[in-house]
Amino acid sequence: MNVLLSIKPKFVEEIKNGNKKYEFRKSLFSKKNLDKIEKVF
């Protein structure tokens, strides 16, 4: 299963600039069998 997460634009910019390395989520996925997570900017 592939997953697409929404990230606020200000956090995407911080990740791209190197100021932020991870984006933590408050809630977990409902499905536990994840094959792959891809980054889309």
Image (cartoon, rainbow, N blue to C red):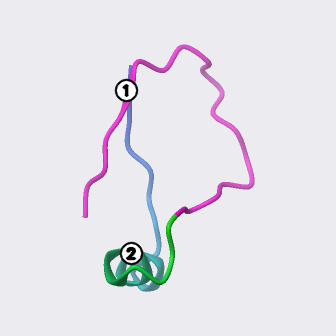
Q: Residue at x 39, y 75 (%)?
A: 12
Locate the N terminus by quadrant: top left
In the displayed structure, 5 sits above or below 29; it is below
Image-quadrant location for residue 33: top right
Report if residue 8 lies within the magenta region: no
SS at badge 2 = helix
In the displayed structure, 25 sits above or below 32; it is below
The outermost residue toward the top is 33
The percent position of residue 2, horizontal first and vertical second, equals: 35, 28
The percent position of residue 41, horizontal first and vertical second, equals: 25, 64
Tell me whether circle 1 and circle 2 mark residues in contact (CB < 8 Å).
no
Q: Residue at x 44, y 86 (%)?
A: 10
SS at badge 1 = strand
Mark 1 to mark 2: distance in Å? 20 Å
Image-quadrant location for residue 25: bottom right
Report if residue 33 lies within the magenta region: yes
In the displayed structure, 28 sits above or below 23; it is above
Q: Residue at x 51, y 76 (%)?
A: 20
Magenta region, residue range: 22-41
Quick one: label 2, few (<14), some, or many (20+) residues within 10 Å? some
The percent position of residue 6, horizontal first and vertical second, equals: 44, 59
Image position of 34 (left or right of 16): right
- Residue 12 is tagged as 2
- Residue 36 is tagged as 1
- Residue 19 is tagged as none
Image position of 38 (left or right of 6): left
Image-quadrant location for residue 23: bottom right
Residue nearest the observer in this picture, 40 or 20: 20
Image position of 8 (left or right of 26): left
In the displayed structure, 27 sits above or below 6; it is above
The kind of residue tagged 1 is Lys
